[in-house]
Amino acid sequence: MDLAQRHPAPDHAPPRPTANQAAAGRVGWKGILREPFRAATWLRLAYLLLALPVGILCVPIALVGGPAGRIQRGLARRLLGVEVKDPRRTGPLALAHAVISLPLNLVALTVSAYFWTVVVINLAYPLRPDSDPSQAWGGPTMAGAWAVHGIGGGVSFLLITPWVMKGFTLLQTRLVKGFLGGDRAGLLKATWIALAVAALCALLSIPVIHQL
């Protein structure tokens, strides 16, 4: 008897991951170095820049029964590549998404903007009007101060920031799929996580604001 006949494959066996999918699950040092320069990173940044104003605009649109859900799904599709099937009706869920996502959109934009500002001001340290190498870390020479600021603050944040943005957009995507699509599994948990992340970032921003 043939081996395949004695041990037939199950009808619903999960498909084996492709080489690209397997590689996507592994992040090596090359991937970390390339991430700031990938088009997907800058599309995420564009989404973070637009999610807050678009979300604010969608609150009154949802209140009057307008296409708030379609607008939010379109933004996620164009900039994040997230395909969410249009449900028959979103109803109050479109308003709920617009309101609940606002705190997360605000902190995501603020944190990302702050991190990118740290990158710029440290990589461009010699151009800063307050750059005094004699009183700075790495001084008293400009080369030493620039090396410390550029590597310690500029390069390190350049490598970290894309992953911070990816974390924010993953959570934002989950809210879009849950509220504006048909995937309700784990939506309540994702909502609480989004609100907790927003609250934590708000608390951590207090000492930063005091230093400005």
Image: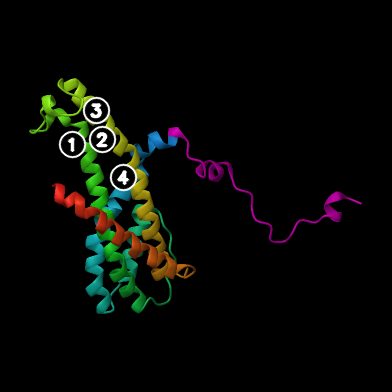
Q: Which residues are magenta?
A: 1-30
Q: Which colour style is shown?
A: rainbow
Q: What's the mark number on residue 121?
A: 1
Q: How many marks?
A: 4
Taking the magenta stretch, the answer to whether it contains residue 121 is no
Q: Nearer the viewer, mark 4 or mark 3?
A: 3
Query: Is label 3 or label 1 in front?
Result: 3
The type of residue carrying mark 2 is Gly
The reply to whether callout 1 and callout 2 are in contact (CB within 8 Å) is yes
Comparing labels 1 and 2, the label whose residue is closer to the camera: 2
Residue 139 picture quarter: top left
Residue 23 numbered tag: none
State how far apart marks 4 and 1 are (Cα).
19 Å
Q: How far apart in space, not on screen, are marks 1 and 2 (Cα)?
A: 9 Å
> Residue at the location (38% across, 39% down)?
35
Q: Marks 4 and 1: which is nearer the front?
A: 1
At label 3, which amino acid type do we have?
Answer: Val
Q: Amino acid at mark 4?
A: Trp
Mark 2, residue position: 153
Is disc 2 surrounded by few (<14), some (14 to 19) or many (20+) residues within 10 Å?
A: some
Q: CA distance from mark 3 to mark 1?
A: 12 Å
Residue placed under numbered mark 4 in the picture: 42
Is the C-beta separation of discs 2 and 3 under 8 Å? no
